[in-house]
Image (cartoon, grey):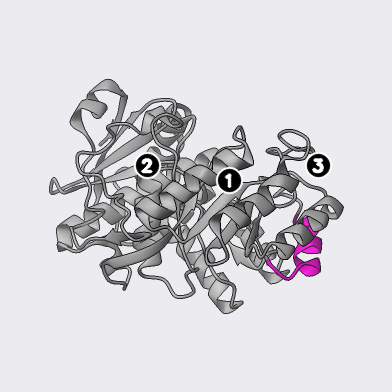
Amino acid sequence: MKIKKLETFSNNFVGFVKLTVEDGSFGWGQLSTYHSDITAKIFHRQVAPWAIGKDIDDLDRLLDLITEREHKFPGSYLRRAMSGLDTSIWDLRGRVASKSVTELLGGSPGKLRAYASSMKRDITPKEEAQRLKILRDEKGFDAFKVRAGAEVGRDSDEWPGRTEEIIPTIRKELGADVDLLIDANSCYSPKRAIEIGHILEDCNFCHFEEPCPYWELEQTKKVTDALTLDVTGGEQDCDLPTWRRMIEMRAVDIIQPDILYLGGINRTLRVVEMANNANIPVTPHCANLSLVTLFTMHLLRAIKGGGKYLEFSIEGVDYYPWQEDLFLNSPFNIEDGMVEVFDSPGWGVEINPSWLESSDYEKSEI
């Protein structure tokens, strides 16, 4: 089946791709979130020209072709645009075969354990603990992630002493029976990260994410080698040779590829294979309730070496107002700390027509 038409619907925060082939079959995918209007321009300028008229059967070859033709532009925006092509092809395949994407990937529909992922730093430790306890009691979460330091903070905190307070507070308030994770978002030097890591170990945290600037793999490895808890990272990385190096040097204990930052399902599967060969678990990054979390759900139900949980953002439209009314049928329902992948064809979700009507529209076609 050859690609006949590629359409994008976008705003500054999120963008969707509709792919149509010669016989009229179609699929929906997504560009990566944030500056998605810019990504849509790149999609039509640097992805669509190489994809229109091409067969969708060999997706790896098509993605490699785009990468090679755009070799002067190896960075994040091109990969974020390629994700829209990849994920729309997977949806089309599922719709045509009347199978969910997870089934096409060799998995099966079913449930996944989720961890409640907080995005907030502008919240006191006591307030954070209180809202997590409510989620524990109402939704059944038994794993939670909070934030340490300041984002890319050069060893500074959101305010003095917040990190040293939130670590023991969350453990005390949530109790001994839950898993606790923390994300530093590239805040620390290795020396400071190791200091914080020992506090985390004392409070039985199990996951220390992106402790050092993510591009400084040697710095991160120093932290990984010095601590007993799992050091994790990789969400920002979109270059396959960087992934190969990160895994070969064992810079982290758990890798966290983001499907939409990386360039789609197929490129993520290549990273998963690298991790499997090195016996490193895969807990993907998916920090909002756009389609990236649904894509990750389907992936985790299919791959070998998947981590213990799905990341599940707990921030609603008060924090991410752009998440409102994206879908006709929300796929994100938490019960007993679990979310379910259903057997509906493709991704099993429909984009809200009223949202599409209000977005910026562009088209490339034969």
Instruction: Indicate left or right for 107 with 204 as reference.
Output: left
The circle drawn on residue 71 is 1
The structure residue drawn at horizontal position 32% and vertical position 45%, both measured from the top left corner, is 29
Labels 2 & 3 near each other (Cβ < 8 A): no
Picture layout, residue 124 above or below residue 345: above
The circle drawn on residue 12 is none
**The stretch drawn in magenta includes residue 228:** yes
Residue 42 visible? The answer is yes
Disc 1 versus disc 2: nearer the observer = 2
Q: Position of residue 223 (x, y in %)?
A: 78, 61
The circle drawn on residue 290 is 2
Picture layout, residue 242 above or below residue 44: below
Residue 286 visible? The answer is no
Q: Nearer the viewer, residue 26 or 247?
A: 247
Decide whether the magenta segment is chiefly helix, strand or loop.
helix
**Residue 346 sits in which quadrant?**
bottom left
Quadrant in which the N terminus appears: bottom left
Which numbered disc flags the more N-terminal residue, 1 or 2?
Answer: 1
